[in-house]
Amino acid sequence: MKPTIIDCVQGSPEWHKARVGIPSASNFDMIVTTTGARSKQREKYLYKLAGEFIIGTPEETYQNAAMQRGLELESEARTLYELITGQICSTTGFWLSDGFGCSPDGIVAENGGFEAKCPTLAVHVGYLLDNKLPTEYFQQVQGSLLVTGREWWDFMSYYPGMKPLIVRVFPDKVFLKALRIELELVVEDLKTIIERIK
């Protein structure tokens, strides 16, 4: 099924409204582990989504200095990515497909996507040494590929003054099969929970 793109600025009230009660890729690690097994956080995440759907607004979440810094550096990272790759990286809104969604940091060319992280210096150096998609973002990046139907996703770790890490990620078909099954179950369970607590 072709995804629906909700045209909104990420972080805006419209964007928050579009995501209310929707499982989104940045939280897919709360639904499945990297092996595709069910996460122990699944139930708590379902309850949170159900509650948000009922009240019609996202729960207030704490944003620390590192998270705020990451948001501020994201456009810098995107500009550097464009310079390095020669590709245009377009900002986009919220993508929705079959009851779950994602908010890509960028859309690249006809078939690509972009995810930027701006970690602390120590974490960035660790990512450079590992030279691969960090495990903690596996579900998010693979989930974004699933929602958008794109062919590849570039993950970028950026720290000002340091060499960036750019890793191209392709769909993991075995994992995505397990993820899709779990997401479909989550969407159904969510409906049941909402019906019971309305």
Image (cartoon, rainbow, N blue to C red):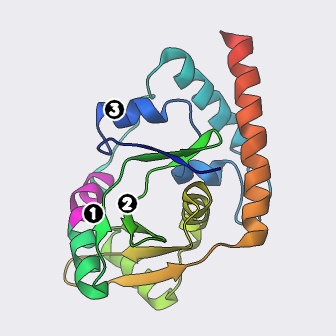
Answer with the quarter of the image where residue 48 lies: top right
Please tell me whether mark 3 sits on a helix, a strand or a loop.
helix
Q: Is residue 68 magenta?
A: yes
The residue depicted at 32 percent of the width and 48 percent of the height is 64
The stretch of residues the image draws in magenta is 67-75
Say which residue label 2 marks: 105
Dot 1 and dot 2 residues touching (CB under 8 Å): yes
Separation of residues labelled 1 and 2 (CA atoms): 8 Å
User: Hey, which residue is sitting farthest top in the picture?
Assistant: 198
Q: Residues within 10 Å of mark 1 (few under 14, many from 20)?
A: some
**Among the two numbered marks 2 and 3 on one chain, the one whose residue lies closer to the N terminus:** 3
Q: Is residue 193 above or below residue 187?
A: above
Q: Is residue 68 above or below residue 121?
A: above
Query: How many numbered badges does the structure rendering display?
Result: 3
Residue 4 % position (x, y): 51, 44
Separation of residues labelled 2 and 3 (CA atoms): 17 Å
Residue 88 % position (x, y): 28, 73
**Among the two numbered marks 1 and 2 on one chain, the one whose residue lies closer to the N terminus:** 1
> Of the numbered discs in the image, which one, if any, rests on residue 14?
3
